[in-house]
Image: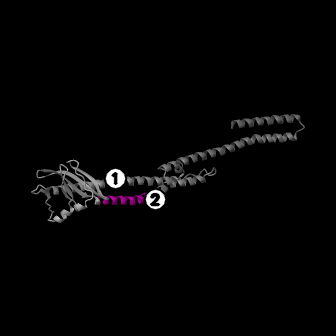
């Protein structure tokens, strides 16, 4: 994986980093939004349960036989709606069911809940049937002098549907956001690295014969501009070095040419005067002097 990653272009790696960063941000944002909405919907459901409890507690009474009864009263005389919407149970502190009102008939209740464990205020969620989740509040109350525990129910279907819709929106929107971020990242990476491509193309054209050329530097104030400036300074030093080398080569050629020319001239003279030993001796001495001069010149180089 590491070798594969290193073989990819910097443009592609930057694009993938943009996409990965966007995916992480979207995931964190979705989680935060989900948690906030879930908590607020849960708090609203608990608030409605408290209101239901207050209304129901005020309407509980005992008949002449001591049985719990519900004196149902709607907000505007609509007792029928109140009977349909109310969902609660009344238990004694001894865990005996005293009254039950569910939105279904008693015979249709498949999974009745057990008695409350403790006589305290508590909220919790249970699944009564498949995909039927309800929020429950249990709270102690008094019907005249009788201590009871009222268990109030609220259907969580709408709450869960809202949360599911939020998840669906983020599931659909997240790939689009990552795709757009990838496009934006590719555009930004391409635009940011365009000076590098231009510098690389120009650097390919520079040879020992064209050291006077320089890399393009549209913005000398950013990091790429500073890099181009350093390369241009290096090219300037190379150009100066090549100029000095050419000058040195020309001077060395001139200095070497003089003793070599003298050696050649003396040798030609010696060939023409080959029958004169004295002249030959002087010629050889002169050639040795020029050879020594040439040796001294080479050592000085």
The reply to whether the magenta stretch includes residue 170 is yes
Q: Which x, y percent locates residue 2?
A: 52, 48
Regarding residue 13, the answer to whether it shows in the image is yes
Q: Is residue 243 left or right of residue 171?
A: right
Q: Which residues are magenta?
A: 159-183
Q: Is residue 125 left or right of residue 290?
A: left
Residue of label 1? 32
Q: Which x, y percent locates residue 41?
A: 27, 56
The vertical placement of 287 against 143, above or below, is: above
Q: Which x, y percent locates residue 124?
A: 26, 52
The vertical placement of 193 against 74, above or below, is: above
Mark seen at residue 10? none
Residue farthest toward the right in the current orientation of the protein: 275
* Dominant SS type (magenta): helix
**Distance from label 2 to label 1 (Cα)?**
26 Å
Which one is closest to the eye, mark 2 or mark 1?
1
Query: In which quadrant will I find the C terminus?
Result: top right
Q: Answer with the quarter of the image where residue 269 lies.
A: top right
Residue at horizontal 77 percent and vertical 42 percent from the top: 261
Is there CB contact under 8 Å for labels 2 and 1? no
Tell which of 76 and 16 is nearer to you. Answer: 76
Tell which of 68 and 56 is nearer to you. Answer: 68
The reply to whether the magenta stretch includes residue 74 is no
């Amino acid at each position: 994986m590491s070798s594969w990653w290193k073989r990819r272009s910097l443009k592609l790696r930057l694009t993938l980093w943009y996409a990965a960063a966007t995916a992480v941000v979207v995931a964190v944002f979705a989680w935060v939004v989900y948690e906030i909405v879930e908590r607020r919907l849960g708090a609203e459901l608990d608030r409605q349960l408290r209101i239901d409890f207050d209304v129901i507690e005020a309407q509980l009474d005992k008949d002449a036989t001591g049985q719990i009864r519900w004196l149902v009263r709607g907000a505007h005389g609509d007792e029928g709606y109140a009977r349909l919407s109310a969902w609660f149970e009344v238990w004694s502190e001894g865990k005996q069911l005293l009254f039950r009102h569910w939105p279904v008939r008693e015979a249709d209740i498949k999974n009745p809940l057990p008695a409350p464990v403790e006589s305290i205020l508590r909220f919790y969620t249970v699944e009564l049937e498949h995909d039927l989740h309800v929020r429950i509040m249990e709270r102690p109350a008094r019907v005249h002098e009788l201590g009871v525990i009222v268990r109030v129910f609220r259907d969580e279907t709408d709450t869960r549907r809202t949360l599911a819709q939020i998840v669906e929106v983020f599931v659909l929107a997240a790939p689009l956001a990552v795709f757009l971020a990838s496009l934006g990242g590719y555009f930004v990476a391409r635009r940011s690295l365009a000076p590098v491509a231009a510098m690389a193309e120009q650097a390919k054209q520079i040879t020992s014969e064209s050291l006077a050329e320089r890399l393009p530097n549209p913005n000398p104030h950013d990091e790429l501009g500073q890099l181009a400036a350093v390369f241009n300074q290096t090219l300037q030093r190379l150009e100066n070095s090549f100029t000095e080398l050419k000058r040195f080569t020309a001077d060395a050629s001139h200095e070497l040419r003089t003793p070599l020319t003298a050696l050649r001239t003396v040798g030609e003279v010696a060939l023409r005067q080959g029958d004169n030993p004295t002249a030959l001796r002087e010629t050889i001495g002169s050639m040795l002097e020029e050879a020594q001069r040439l040796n001294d010149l080479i050592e000085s180089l």
